[in-house]
Image (tube, helix red, strand yellow):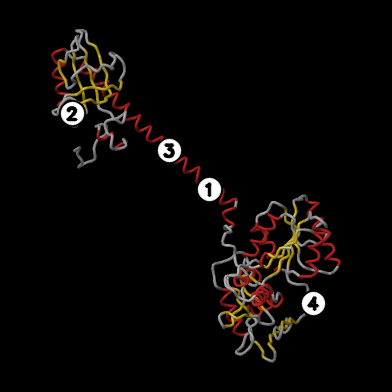
Amino acid sequence: MVLVSGKRTNRASASSSAADLAAAVGSELMTKVLLIEDDSETAEEISAELSDRGFEVEWSANGIEGLDKARSSHPDAMIVDRLLPGMDGLTVIEALRKEQVRTPVLVLSALGAVDDRVRGLRMGGDDYLTKPFALVELIARVEALLRRPVESRETTLRVGPLELDLIERTARRGDRAIDLLPREFRLLEYMMQRSDQLLTRAMLLEEVWNYKFIPATNLVDVHMGRLRHKVDGPGEVPMIHNVRGSGFILRADHRSRMVGGDLAPVTPSTSRQRNPMRQPQFIHSTTFRWALAVAGVLAIFVIVLFGFIYWKTDSYLIERSDRMIARQLHFIGDLPGGRQLDAIAQHLDQDSRGVQYAGLFGPDGRKIAGNLEKFPLDLKLDESVQSVPILRTLPGGPQTRVIRAIARSASDGNALVIGREVDETRGNLPRRRPGVGARAFAGLLPLPAGRSVA
């Protein structure tokens, strides 16, 4: 038998009797849920979630032991697996119903057929949940079972000195009459029908205010403050208690413990401590995993998209440069020999950025005109545009560059070469990653207004 809510870590050297007293008081303040489940992993997840929501959970791994605990501990609700060792879950429920035990029971089972669900409910189950299931749905079903009023024909509710007449619509605490508004009367009636039971704000909003959603409001706290002021008069023992972070409890007697010499109400946060190594439940949820998968796919898509744009931009710029080079070659090559020299000189004079290349070479390879020192050895005549290394004459001396160039042979044996500097091999701009900016630097794109190449 594992008592989940009983797990705690002593951080100070206090006496064992004081610790046991605090744990016992804290357990009485919490709603008790008996879990009968033979799968330890499933039981651990259910117990942890229920404990985090303010329930006291007891776990039994077989049917016989679970039946004994149901008879002795008197839980507020039960969660029973159908297929259990020792005794079947439905047999456990049937035995309790024959003994007039009316504790609400949620049946868990991997058998989800209609006949299986009907049999589970007819054997005494109050609700039926098939596996696999979401923890949040299980919690909601348990809370719904706890919201069901206890069967009673009484017209007067009594909790300790508090008395509520449902016919006359009057309330008294001892000899003192309590004047309640209609909403306050309904709230107190609901709490008295479930005395010693933890009532969450969501439960109160749904049952007392008939809200089908949970609004972001302090409506419950405001009405509870007014009701507490009327029920717990000056000098009287408090009966309405606020369990911090969980909800409210109506108790006939007030249990408290010493904290630093002062009296303080016991809450689930003081009677148990969360495991700091336990990860939040949402990390293991299917929604969180799907969100991670979608984020990964989107990241890959963005990377591929930017790579494709860069590749298309690079290809477009090179193709555009090649077309310009081919047009210039045909234009100059179709001119008479004397005018070719003037066209080459004019072509280079108009190159303010120094990215144009031209050369006219004789049959013996001797330079006739242009800014190329030699005919590029790797350049093939009368073919398409190619990437070749060239030797260019500059004021500081000859320099080797890689250009896109095309060559054409003339009828007189001369060879005309037209080229343009394109950073296709990433060799001309070693200190920066080439892109659109590098292409603009190479003269393929117009510079923004007011900008100049240094």
Query: Residues at badges 4 and 1 in contact (C-beta under 8 Å)?
Result: no
Residue 17, by quadrant, is: bottom right
The span from disc 3 to disc 4 (Cα, nearest Å) is 71 Å
Query: Residues at badges 3 and 4 in contact (C-beta under 8 Å)?
Result: no
Q: Residue 395 vs residue 431: left or right?
A: left
The span from disc 4 to disc 1 (Cα, nearest Å) is 54 Å
Q: Earlier in the sequence, mark 2 or mark 1?
A: 1
Q: Amino acid at mark 1?
A: Leu
**In this orientation, which residue lies closer to the viewer: 88 or 40?**
40
Name the secondary structure under disc 1. Answer: helix
Q: Mark 3 sits on what residue? A: 305
Q: Mark 2 sits on what residue? A: 351
Q: Mark 1 sits on what residue? A: 292
**In this orientation, which residue lies closer to the viewer: 81 or 4?**
4
Q: In the image, which is nearer the foreground, mark 3 or mark 1? A: 1
Q: Earlier in the sequence, mark 4 or mark 1?
A: 4
Query: Residues at badges 3 and 2 in contact (C-beta under 8 Å)?
Result: no
The span from disc 2 to disc 1 (Cα, nearest Å) is 53 Å
- Where does the image place residue 404, in percent across and percent down from the top left? 28, 24
- Where does the image place residue 265, in percent across and percent down from the top left? 61, 78
Question: The C terminus lies in which quarter of the figure?
Answer: top left
Q: Mark 4 sits on what residue? A: 153
- Disc 1 crowd, CA 10 A, few/some/many (<14, 14-19, 20+): few
